[in-house]
Amino acid sequence: MTINIPTTLVGARVQARYCEGDHCCEPDGEVRVYPILSVSRAAHVILCHDCWDHENRYRHERGKELGRPEHWRTRDWEVAERYQPLRSAAETTAPLGIACGEENPICAPACA
């Protein structure tokens, strides 16, 4: 994934960090989890607000086209789960010489 900053790359497409969509407007916009399957909720995509709106418009129109809007439900941004990227092992491990349990902002979440 690449992040383009519009002020330095004129005409380049903007891609929000962690967003899996193609309609981003802000490189550092918040992203949330958009569930695709309504029954199992096993499938999802990570979308910024602009891509979220685009997906909802698409699902609304597709449901009308097929005459089955109940199979193409839209999702509410306000109640969606915020996406939290996985932390690497290096981020959760205490630096050498600092033991867990001491005041260590890197280790504190992993030791709790």
Image (tube, rainbow, N blue to C red):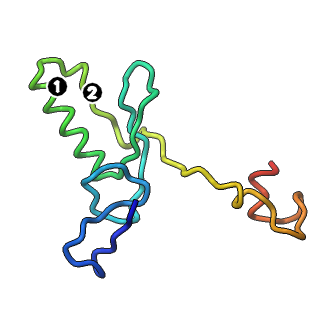
The secondary element bearing badge 2 is classed as loop
Q: Nearer the viewer, residue 2 or 106?
A: 2
The secondary element bearing badge 1 is classed as helix
Tell me if residue 59 comes above or below residue 32 in the rendering. Answer: above
Q: Position of residue 4 (x, y in %)?
A: 33, 70
Three-letter code for the amino acid on which mark 1 is drawn: Gly
Instruction: Report which quarter residue 70 is drawn in.
Output: top left
Instruction: Report which quarter residue 80 is drawn in.
Output: top left
Q: Residue beneath label 2, please? A: 73
Q: Position of residue 29 (x, y in %)?
A: 38, 60
Q: Nearer the viewer, residue 45 or 74?
A: 45
Tell me if residue 38 comes above or below residue 35 in the rendering. Answer: above
Q: Which residue sits at x=21%, y=33%?
A: 59
Looking at the rendered image, the quarter that the N terminus falls into is bottom left
Tell me if residue 32 comes above or below residue 11 in the rendering. Answer: above
User: Which residue, as the protein is rendered here, is positioned at the far front?
Assistant: 1
**Would you say 81 lies left or right of 110 here?**
left
User: Which residue, as the protein is rendered here, is positioned at the far bottom?
Assistant: 8
User: Which residue, as the protein is rendered here, is positioned at the far left?
Assistant: 65
Q: Which residue sits at x=28%, y=75%?
A: 6
* CB contact under 8 Å: marks 1 and 2: yes
Q: Which residue sits at x=36%, y=60%?
A: 16
Three-letter code for the amino acid on which mark 2 is drawn: Arg
Q: Which residue sits at x=82%, y=51%?
A: 111
Q: Residue beneath label 1, please? A: 63
**Would you say 50 lies left or right of 88 here?**
left
Instruction: Report which quarter residue 15 is drawn in.
Output: bottom left
Q: Position of residue 56 (x, y in %)?
A: 24, 38
Q: Nearer the viewer, residue 34 or 75?
A: 34
Which of pointers 1 and 2 lies earlier in the amino acid sequence? Answer: 1
